[in-house]
Image (spheres, grey):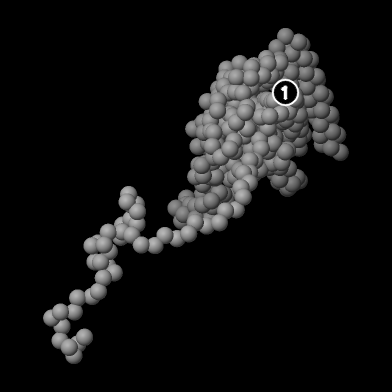
Amino acid sequence: MDILLRLLVAIGFALLVTAVVALVLHLVLRAIARRERWAGVLSRRTKHPFRTVLLVVLLWIAFTSSIPRNADAYPWRDEVVHAFLIVTIAAGCWLACQVAIFLEDLGLHRFRIDVPDNRQARRIRTQVLIIRRLTVALLVIIAVGAILLTFDGVEAAGASVLASAGLISVVAGLAAQSTLGNVFAGMQLAFSGSIRVDDVVVVEQQWGRIEEITLTYVVVHLWDDRRFVLPSTYFTSTPFENWTRTGSELLGAVEFDLDWRVSPADMRAELDRILDTSTIWDRRVKVLQVTDAVGGLVRVRILVTAPDAGGLFDLRCYVREEMVEWIQRTHPDALPVQRVQLTEPTAPAPRRRGRPAEGDSQLFGDDERGALFTGPIQTSGIPESER
């Protein structure tokens, strides 16, 4: 009974110490967060895992200090201590993962992607996200290995496991060949810079933005809010379009097929007026050219630029709409038309016979040349029986 009472007192003291330490740490971080943003982020990230680790460790100390080491009286003591050890390792892994994520977020805070020129920031963010997943996976593997080592007999089985490691690695490599290929492809994408988070790409004739890059797959956020999930190996083995590889600025074309009576000079003046009223045009390129004039129509191409892909699409639609309305209102004669020429049927000319007139160009009009192909066949020298 004394041991049980002492255990309850030790547990109560552990809970009290945990509450006091957690409260003091929370107040300190909140005071620092008023001047430094990282303190608030650290508090949110590590609050629950730190309290869990502290509570488990204090309860472990309370139990071991209250229950004496007596195998006959308390045969279950070692199993409880072993359980405390496993829980402590798991909670410590949780805390280490949260601290690693906090440090990575702290570095990412310096690289913002909500600014116009964010190519470098998106590259760093992509690499850090891949490193985060690798770090978390490594910490979990270490924690699982540490837990396994706490069981008796694992040390003795280590030699046999290492002896068969070669065969196991070959079998595992063959079984997970595609998965390992995607993992290496994901790492290659993260550090090669071929794609980054928030890049605008065209894959499988679908236009969208890179939303997420993992070790095994890439999520593309399509323009109509669908998600296109592709394996990482797709981007290392299949050609695709990256519209923001070196910058987010893009150039787009608007084309018109109009009548020959169109005035390119008037269209050019109207284009100046349209772009001056637009807030999307970035004022880099403004070109109007006649690129073709065959088949009864004149093709007019307008080139404009915008700061990003979404803005370019809206700008092209705006220029096209305004120009169509202007042509309909001020130059209806420039609208495309199809011309058809109607003629009266005439009687066919009579066929001439005899020698062609002087100056006619005929291959077989000459008598001597025509005789070579149409004259009588020479039969002299051929026996009568063979004629």
Q: Quadrant of the C terminus?
A: bottom left
Q: Quadrant of the N terminus?
A: top right
How busy is the neighbourhood of tag 1: few (under 14 within 10 Å), some, or many (20 plus)?
Answer: few
State the residue in front, 186 or 12: 186
Residue occupying image coordinates x 72% and y 23% = 330
Q: Where's residue 278, x and y in %?
A: 70, 18
Residue 199 appears in view: no
On screen, 183 above or below 248?
Answer: below
State the residue in front, 69 or 272: 272
Q: Is residue 35 left or right of residue 1?
A: left
Q: Is residue 325 left or right of residue 302?
A: right
On screen, 105 above or below 215?
Answer: above
Q: Where's residue 241, x and y in %?
A: 55, 37
Residue occupying image coordinates x 71% and y 16% = 277
Q: How many marks?
A: 1
Q: Where's residue 67, x and y in %?
A: 76, 37
Q: Is residue 129 left or right of residue 163?
A: right
Q: Residue under label 1, please give it.
A: 330
State the residue in front, 53 or 140: 140
What kind of element bears circle 1? Answer: helix
